[in-house]
Amino acid sequence: MKGLRHSLSVLVAGIGLVPGLHAQDSASAVTTNLRVYQSLAASLGDSLANLTSTVDSPRVTVRIAPPDVAWFLQDAVERPFRARNCIISAGDSARYSVEFGAVEMKVQYSNLRRPGIFGSRVLDRMIVLLARLRLVDRATGVVLMTGERKAFFSDTIDLSEIERIEHSALPVTRGALPPEDFFSGIAEPLVIVGAVAVAIFLLFTVRS
């Protein structure tokens, strides 16, 4: 009898403990959507920087379009060139000319679900950056790269993280939330309530 009573007590206590632990463990590792975009832009910039010569620390001009995303992508695209000892220059006399045009930037959330009966709700996140790239060596007149390139990032995050990882002033950092499936939204809470009711009933039955 004591063993059964102890097991039921653990079951009821676990309802409050498990979600809190899950949220605490996952919160610190989630990168904001803005930071993800910057990482993706840096990876595309790196693909261009790898085509340049590092001899004599060449000068590079980097133009980002459209203007409303340039302010938070500019440094990310330039960073790989600096890592290769290139000098970022605003003048037209630079040896290399880089054009980076953001064609598509989107955040997609999908598959909203609850991994376990007592777990917090999670969903899949995908962030896509499609850019039109052009790299010209002005010294030789050779176009080293031209065309569209895509970079993307995906992971799984807690639903509770959405407000923190999005930027209220930047629409490109926000995405539409998917509808919750029937089991997670309606049936699952009923299962939880039913389980608690049964546990309480059995607990008092054992006592009597």
Image (tube, rainbow, N blue to C red):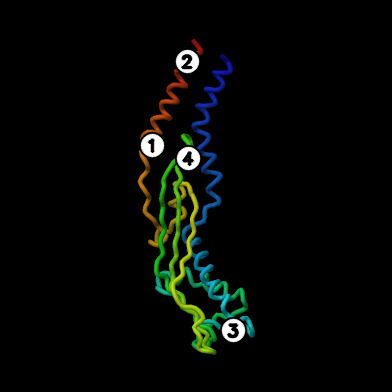
The span from disc 3 to disc 1 (Cα, nearest Å) is 59 Å
Residue 63 in view (yes/no): no
- Asked if the residue at tag 3 contacts the one at tag 4, i.e. Cβ–Cβ closer than 8 Å, the answer is no
Q: Earlier in the sequence, mark 4 or mark 3?
A: 3
Amino acid carrying label 1: it is Phe
Viewport quadrant of the N terminus? top right
Farthest residue in the right direction?
A: 55
Front: mark 2 or 3: 3
Residue in the image at 60% along x and 81% along y = 53
In this rendering, the answer to whether 207 lies above or below 195 is above
Mark 4, Cα crowd under 10 Å, few <14 / some 14-19 / many 20+, is: few
Residue in the image at 42% along x and 70% along y = 102
Q: Earlier in the sequence, mark 2 or mark 3?
A: 3
The span from disc 4 to disc 2 (Cα, nearest Å) is 31 Å
Mark 1, Cα crowd under 10 Å, few <14 / some 14-19 / many 20+, is: few
Residue highlighted by disc 2: 204
Q: Earlier in the sequence, mark 3 or mark 1?
A: 3
